[in-house]
Amino acid sequence: MDMEQLMAQAKELQDKVASAQEKLAKTKITGMASGGACIVEMTGKYDLLSVKLREDIAGHSAKEISDIVMAAFRDAKSKADSVIDNVMGDATAGMPL
């Protein structure tokens, strides 16, 4: 393989990764906890879009509310991790970055 061909492949990979990153930035992922008492939305780049709390959560202690919000965030992050793995895996054809 000559240098020109190698550079062309590198450019193609770079373009695919950039496209995948754009897709992740536009992808919305939802996590929830306590039966929907807290819903967290983020992008596939972990940018937090919203945190929604049901009104009936107000009767809980601050610690309980914090735990519920954290659980919803972890749910969203876990889902985002899976989406990222799939999208970046497709873009890189399984090559480790």
Image (cartoon, rainbow, N blue to C red):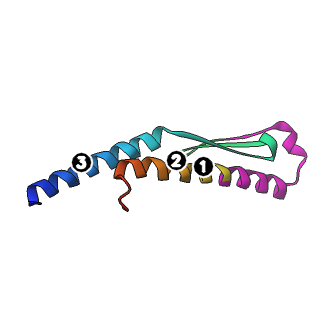
Q: Is residue 85 left or right of residue 17?
A: right
Q: Which residue is disc 2 drawn over? A: 83
Please tell me which residue lies in front, 89 or 21: 89
Element under disc 1: helix
Q: Earlier in the sequence, mark 3 or mark 1?
A: 3
Q: Amino acid at mark 1?
A: Lys
Does residue 71 sit above or below 36 in this rendering?
Answer: below
**What's the magenta region?**
51-74
Graded by Cα atoms within 10 Å as few (under 14), some (14 to 19) or many (20 or more), the crowding at tag 3 reads some
- Separation of disc 2 and disc 3 at Cα? 22 Å
Magenta stretch: dominant SS? Answer: helix
Callouts 1 and 2 close, C-beta under 8 Å: yes
Provide residue 68's location: percent of width, then percent of height. Answer: 78, 52
Q: Which label number is shown at residue 79?
A: 1
Provide residue 47's location: percent of width, then percent of height. Answer: 53, 47
Q: Amino acid at mark 2?
A: Val
The part of the image, by quadrant, that contains residue 61 is: bottom right
The residue shown at (37%, 62%) is: 96
